Image (tube, rainbow, N blue to C red):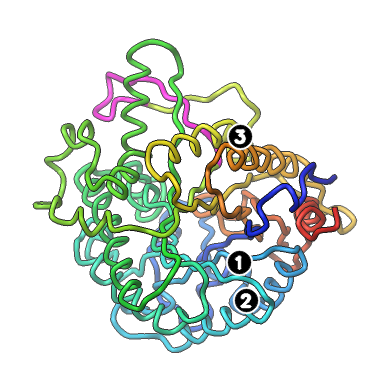
């Protein structure tokens, strides 16, 4: 099964890539890696499916050459990877030489294969020692993150093409400190609002460090929420505006306008850190590109009987992925055009994650994930349309290169372009991988 597009349908400098995250694939038991809040949260009953953890994951720490060969064979231009803070600074202060050496080897391997390294400094993995002091609810953590940024960029900054500071700050802060759905699993509005500010402050401080090293092509990766009201009644429409403040305007307004949404601050500003306004100029410092991760939409219904934010998500009528997420490519178009018109204008945008979980099985050494092929087809046709509209989209990264540790869902959910047998660590490229291979290699 092939795509109905080819590389010729995109600008000549368009980047096709595959994405991963450190904890999800590397294996935290290797290379003297330190403990992260995922190592401990996963061992607390009820937090993670089957109490799975990332101790072995895909053994990428030892098999990265094999995985980089896969990326190269797929015809991709770039590899988006992240660095593990716990691997590099296990105690939060001292450097683990094995950790830095690993990323040195990894980046060398990426470059040797003619791929562009796209570095994400932080993808959800906080050292346990940082969690001990309150994690992202503590202002000291952004300061420490600046130190980590300095260590990483001094070692590998000379070879990376793109750097993003934070992956999905909404997940890092709101999902993890208010909803409690990911490590550290806290449900507290005060902690959440501090985390929502401190994660943006961490971006600003990291950006400051990166600029001091004359690093180029700097950005941040956001999972902006495209919300739609479950009905036309005023209550659901107002609830959707609140959803939008938490998921989208909090990040876009602070980055591009220098303030947080007033409708949200009016409700929960009393939980914010003192004098947070003084940080806004640092948070809104110019970036060179914006990464957007998109998977689905939020269908929003008012919940006036609940405390603020007075809404809940409801199931929609569209076909769903293994995660239970609606397949709604039109939401990507609406989101991209809105961001372009209201915020970014000519700022380059990259789709840094897009993909679907599917119950994939290997049969006779084949994995025919045709639903995923259709998913990518539909979303990349949206990208083509948005480029024609004028949105300066410069790249697309499929999530994920490999089936991997899917956080609180353990190893049950499979997002990979490449199937991983976790018992044998055998890699089997799926039909979706082969579709990309044909479409972007220039042979279609």
Question: Which residue is painted at 66% across and 77% down in the image?
Answer: 63
Viewer-proximal residue, 124 or 262?
262
> Tags 2 and 1 in contact by the CB under 8 Å rule?
yes
Pinpoint residue 143: horizontal percent, then vertical percent: 23, 69
Please give the residue where the numbered disc 2 appears in the rendered image.
110
Instruction: Give the residue furthest to the right.
Output: 364
Question: Which residue is painted at 30% across and 76% down in the image?
Answer: 212
- The image's mark for residue 124 is none
Q: Is residue 310 magenta?
A: yes
**Left or right: 121 with respect to 354?**
left
| Magenta highlight range | 295-311
Viewer-proximal residue, 390 or 117?
390
The image quarter in which residue 141 lies: bottom left
Secondary structure mostly seen in magenta is loop
Please give the residue where the numbered disc 3 appears in the rendered image.
329
Distance from disc 1 to disc 3, alpha carbons, whole Å, reads 24 Å
Please give the residue where the numbered disc 1 appears in the rendered image.
79
Instruction: Give the residue furthest to the left.
Output: 274
Residue 194 against residue 109 in the figure, above or below: above
Is residue 374 visible from the viewing direction of this image? yes
Which quarter of the figure is the N terminus placed in? top right
Pinpoint residue 162: horizontal percent, then vertical percent: 49, 67
Distance from disc 2 to disc 1, alpha carbons, whole Å, reads 7 Å
Chain-order first, disc 1 or disc 3: 1
């Amino acid at each position: 099964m092939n795509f109905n597009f080819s590389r010729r349908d995109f600008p000549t400098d368009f980047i096709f890539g595959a994405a991963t995250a450190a904890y999800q694939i590397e294996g935290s038991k290797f290379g003297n890696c330190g403990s992260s809040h995922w190592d401990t949260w996963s061992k607390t009953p009820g937090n993670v499916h089957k109490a799975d953890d990332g101790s072995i994951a895909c053994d990428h720490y030892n098999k990265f050459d094999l995985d980089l060969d896969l990326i190269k064979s797929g015809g991709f231009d770039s590899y988006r990877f992240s660095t593990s803070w716990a691997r590099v600074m296990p105690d939060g202060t001292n450097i683990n030489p094995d950790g830095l050496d690993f990323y040195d080897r990894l980046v060398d391997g990426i470059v040797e294969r003619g791929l562009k390294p796209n570095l994400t400094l932080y993808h959800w993995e906080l050292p346990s020692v940082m969690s001990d002091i309150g994690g992202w609810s503590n202002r000291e953590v952004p300061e420490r993150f600046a130190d980590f940024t300095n260590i990483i960029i001094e070692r590998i900054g000379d070879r990376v093409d793109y750097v993003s500071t934070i992956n999905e700050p909404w997940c890092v802060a709101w999902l993890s400190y208010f909803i409690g759905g990911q490590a550290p699993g806290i449900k507290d509005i005060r902690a959440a609002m501090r985390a929502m500010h401190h994660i943006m402050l961490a971006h600003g401080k990291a950006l400051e460090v990166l600029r001091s090293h004359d690093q180029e092509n700097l950005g941040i990766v956001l999972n902006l929420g495209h919300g739609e009201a479950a009905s036309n009644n005023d209550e659901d429409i107002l609830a959707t505006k609140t959803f939008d403040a938490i998921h989208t305007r909090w990040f876009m307004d602070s980055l591009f306008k220098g303030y947080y949404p007033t409708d949200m601050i009016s409700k929960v500003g009393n939980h914010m850190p003192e004098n947070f306004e003084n940080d806004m100029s640092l948070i809104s410092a110019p970036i060179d590109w914006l990464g957007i991760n998109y998977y689905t939409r939020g269908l929003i219904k008012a919940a006036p009987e609940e405390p603020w934010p007075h809404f809940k998500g409801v199931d929609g009528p569209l076909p769903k992925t293994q995660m239970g997420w609606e397949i709604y490519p039109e939401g990507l178009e609406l989101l991209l055009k809105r961001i372009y018109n209201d915020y970014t204008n000519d700022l380059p945008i990259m789709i840094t994650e897009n993909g679907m979980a599917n119950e994939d099985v290997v049969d006779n050494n084949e994995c025919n994930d045709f639903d995923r092929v259709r998913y990518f087809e539909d979303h990349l046709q949206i990208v083509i349309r948005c480029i024609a509209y004028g949105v300066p989209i410069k790249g697309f990264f499929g999530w994920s290169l490999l089936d991997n540790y899917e956080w609180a869902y353990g190893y049950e959910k499979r997002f990979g372009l490449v199937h991983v047998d976790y018992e044998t660590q055998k890699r089997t490229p799926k039909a979706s991988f082969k579709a990309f291979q044909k479409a972007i290699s220039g042979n279609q």
